Amino acid sequence: MNLKTRIVIIDVISALFILLFVYAALTKVTDYQKFRIELGKSPLLNSYARIIAVVVPGIELLISLLIAIKRFQYYAMYLAFSLMAVFSAYILAILKFSPYVPCSCGGILQNMNWTQHLIFNLGFLLLAAAAILFYPKKTKVLTLE
């Protein structure tokens, strides 16, 4: 695969992550009360609901910003991969060990069941892995020039 094609693929994946994380963060912030309450119902997160309700949208926005800045994009994709891995592990833990399955997602994602949400997350994990693998070896900063 030539360099130009790889850069286009990385740019598309980056745009998808920015869209996902900004949308998710803004949904959480605009309906903060619901998000915090649902986190409080989680058997795994209830003790940390207040801090998570602030930190998670902040992390999503920060990763989006870093992905948008070419200089940090490569490393930000590792952060995006890690965050999606954490979200996926949380979904697996809830599905496996919790009698109650809280939903703290908003917007379009709230219409998915937990299995669909897990598949969605795993798809984004694969996209992040692809972007990392497609990155040129000689440089961590991409340009079409």
Image (tube, grey):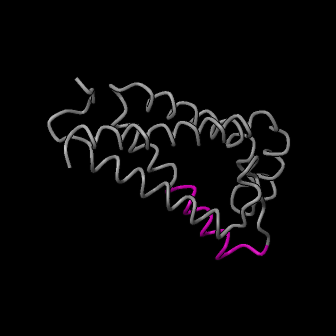
The image shows residue 11 at horizontal and vertical percentages of 39, 37
Q: Is residue 28 above or below residue 43?
A: above
Residue at the image position 35 percent from the left and 47 percent from the top: 131
The image shows residue 134 at horizontal and vertical percentages of 27, 47
Q: Main secondary structure of the magenta part?
A: helix
Using residue 139 as the reference point, say whether residue 7 is left or right of it.
right
The image shows residue 48 at horizontal and vertical percentages of 70, 48
Q: Nearer the viewer, residue 79 or 68?
A: 68
Q: Is residue 29 above or below residue 135?
A: above
Using residue 6 as the reference point, say whether residue 24 is left or right of it.
right
- Magenta residues, as a range? 85-99
Q: How many marks?
A: 0
Q: From the image, which quarter does the C terminus lie in? A: top left
Q: Nearer the viewer, residue 36 or 44?
A: 36
Residue at the image position 43 percent from the left and 44 percent from the top: 13
Using residue 18 as the reference point, say whether residue 54 is left or right of it.
right
Q: Is residue 118 above or below residue 140?
A: below
Residue 24, picture quadrant = top right
Q: Is residue 130 above or below residue 63?
A: below
Using residue 77 as the reference point, say whether residue 44 is left or right of it.
right
Q: Is residue 115 magenta?
A: no
Residue at the image position 50 percent from the left and 35 percent from the top: 63
The image shows residue 140 at horizontal and vertical percentages of 24, 33
Residue 79, picture quadrant = top left
Residue at the image position 67 percent from the left and 73 percent from the top: 95
Farthest-out residue, left? 138
